[in-house]
Amino acid sequence: MIPYRKFSHPGSTFVPGVVQTQKSAVLLLDLDLGELDLGELGGTVVPASETGVVTEPFDQPRDLPPYLLRYPNPWGLGHRRKKGLENLRAAVTRYRNGYGGMSFEGLLGALLRFEERSDTDTTLLVDEIVVRLSGSTAEAAEQLAGVLHELHRRSMPRRRCLQFDRALQRVLFLLRGTASYDLAFACLRSERSLRRWAAYKFYGIRGLDDQARSVLAFQAIRGEIEEPGTASVRFYPGSLIAKDAALVANLDLAVVLKVAPTTEMRKIAIEFAMSSESPATVAAKCEDYPQELVWAVQDGCRSEFLPFIMDMIDDYRDDPYLLHYLLRCVACIGCRDDLEYALHVASAVIDLADAEQ
């Protein structure tokens, strides 16, 4: 591989590492030019520290086919070659040493012999299953879920258990159908945390069923919600509860607000409660979550909450951050007099802050 080349010609802007014409630009960064005669291109290669100027007419490169001249990748041909070699090596490994040529039924048979495989072999097998799942039928996904469920019930050595946990985290959320929900529920009740979190991710993507709702409701009531720092917050059990209208309706909103992990999730739960509970009830349960309440009211233009929002204008005048959200909310759901009062309070807060500086 060669370093950057500088190449230019009349009528074009000089760019390091680029062959430019008025019609096209071909990047020569990291391109093996051993067989490419740049003299034939009508240009001159100069040291990287200098600028080359072509004094002869520039013609299209003769040794590059048209499809490469049209190559749109902004990193150019050097990047294309590097990425191509990377993909080529992966493909060779997949089909020579992996399971690329095996039927889906063959993959399931190999998976059933999970305990017999090395770590590397297991990785290649799971890689192939993940690739195949994107184009698989619902029947094939159900068959895979059945095989995984059988492996889940097996007693394995500790290292193989860990390998299977990781496989479930990569595959479970890609499954669909009744058998996949049965497997997810089994993982949800597992003593192994990685399997539980594979189930949480599955439910976060596929949605909860009644079995999962019963387990999550029990966790919420007992205060046993898991919140590790290594998983995406949208798959936290508290997030699953807050995003499920049925669970918010069955659990008390106050309970849901305590387990929901983020402001956004609490706001979503409040929006669900607004459809079934009175404004006074919702406002009372949101006493410790004023920002979430204001956000939900404004997003839904819930004018029935205006009296509570106007009370909050006075209650939170010492919090400019929340007050500015309240002002925006009043502008959305209130009349002109309501907005004038909110502006009066906000202006007084600003004047007092300026005077204290």
Image: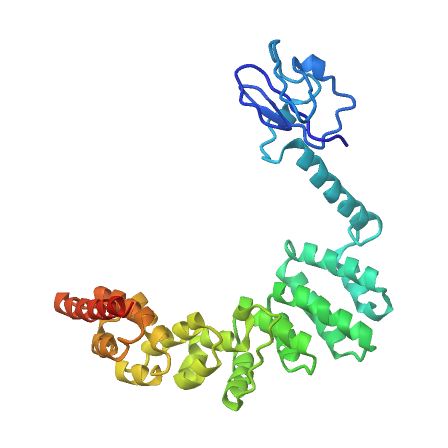
In this view, the residue farthest toward the left is 337
**Relative height, residue 351 to residue 103 (above, below):** below
Question: Quadrant location of residue 164?
Answer: bottom right
Q: Residue at x 70, y 66 (%)?
A: 144
156 on left or right of 221: right
Choose between 29 and 148: the one closer to the eye: 29
Q: How is the image coloured?
A: rainbow
Image vertical order of residue 39 relative to residue 16, above or below: above
Residue under the image location 59 percent in, 25 percent down: 25
The x and y percentages for residue 301 are 26, 67
Residue 338 lies left or right of residue 225; in this view the side is left
Q: Is residue 53 visible?
A: yes
In the rendered image, which quarter contains the N terminus?
Answer: top right
Q: Is residue 134 above or below residue 145?
A: above
Q: Nearer the viewer, residue 238 or 261?
A: 261
Return the x and y of residue 249 as percentages of the image width and height: 40, 82
Q: Position of residue 239 (x, y in %)?
A: 50, 74
Q: Which of the image's four quarters has the C terminus?
A: bottom left
Q: Find residue 42 and report its horizontal and vertical position in percent.
A: 65, 12
Q: Residue furthest top?
A: 56
Q: Quadrant of residue 37?
A: top right
Q: Nearer the viewer, residue 213 or 223?
A: 223
Total labels: the figure holds 0
| 159 left or right of 258 in image | right
The residue closer to the viewer here, 40 or 46, is: 46
Q: Residue at x 72, y 66 (%)?
A: 167
Q: Is residue 174 left or right of residue 243?
A: right
Residue 275 in sight: no
Image quadrant where residue 21 sits: top right
